[in-house]
Amino acid sequence: QEATYRWPSVRIRYPAADLPPFAHAISDGEKPAGILATKDDALILDTLGLNSAALKAIPEPQPLQGELAQWQEPLLSNQPELQQANASLNAASAAADRARRDRIPDPSLAVFSGRESFGEESIVGVRLSMPIPGSNRSQTMRQRYADEAVARADKEILQRSLRAETENRYRQTNSEFQRWQLAKQMAGNLGENARLLQKAYRLGEQDLQGLLLGQQQHARAALAEVESRVDALRSHYQLRLAAGELNPFTSSHAINPINSSHLSDNPAEKLQ
């Protein structure tokens, strides 16, 4: 079986096995009924499986609402490592404060009463005791203060590290969204180019090789757009999940600019 490429004065034969599936539809002498010029892109994408209902159900990502400073507070407050560091610092501070108070023993005051002169006279006395502390209490206090300083330094190092990580995550989410916008624009441009090549081919102004190349570029751009859309959605929801916005137990900590109020009617987006 061979597919025939028709030219006004030249007829060239290509082996049918060398043509992709969608090339058979455009290389036949008669165009299938019901396929209009405006449906060329859909025909190609349907043949390649890029126009399926599953891919159409993937919602378009939304840009982040709010500046970096507005995101860092909820992102840091929902970090388990930072919460653990805060608890360790509070415990070390309490132990240091207790050691400071225990460095000097508490004085004791005693009141006593008695009788003398064969019980005929009552006497009342007061006794004050002031213990002298040893070196062990001072050493314990210095150790507790050192533990507090270590816990505070560990928290500051962890906080700086997490702050840089949240900043990178925020910038990565914005970058993924911009990358998807470029991929969408590129797919649209190459889709228009493929449509014009299809029209030129039917008018006899374009050869089959150029047509197939344009359609291949369009298909690759459409696939890249889907992949970048998924990456942008993944990065977006990971950021919102890390900020505690999608967690029903911590949703009250979400800041207002993050809450997306412009959700579409797409059922896939309502899963947010």
Image (cartoon, rainbow, N blue to C red):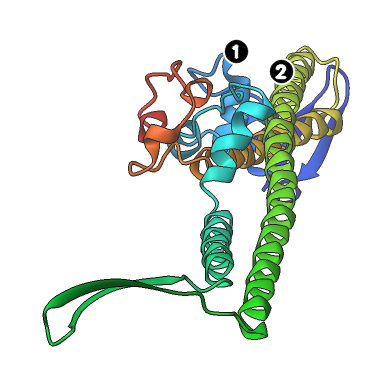
Let me know if residue 234 appears in the view: no
Mark 2 or 1 closer to N-term? 1
Examine the rendered structure and indicate whether residue 108 appears above or below residue 272.
Answer: below
Q: Where is residue 132 in the image (x, y as percent from the top left)?
A: 58, 80
* Disc 2: which residue: 195
Which residue: 45% across, 39% down? 54
Closer to the camera in the image, 201 or 153: 153
| Secondary structure state at the residue bearing disc 1 | helix
**164 relative position to 32: left or right:** right
Let me know if residue 241 appears in the view: yes
* Disc 1: which residue: 38
Q: Residues within 10 Å of mark 1 (few under 14, many from 20)?
A: few
Q: How crowded is mark 2: few (under 14 residues within 10 Å), some or many (20 or more)?
A: many
Whether label 2 touches label 1, CB < 8 Å: yes
Closer to the camera in the image, 13 or 260: 260
**112 relative position to 31: left or right:** left
**211 relative position to 162: left or right:** right
Residue 79, disc: none
- Work out how far the residue at label 2 is from the one at label 1, CA to CA, in angstroms: 8 Å
Examine the rendered structure and indicate whether residue 34 appears above or below residue 114.
Answer: above
Q: Quadrant of the C terminus?
A: top left
| Secondary structure state at the residue bearing disc 2 | helix
Residue type, mark 1 in image: Thr
Closer to the camera in the image, 221 or 228: 228
Quadrant of the rendered structure where residue 23 is? top right
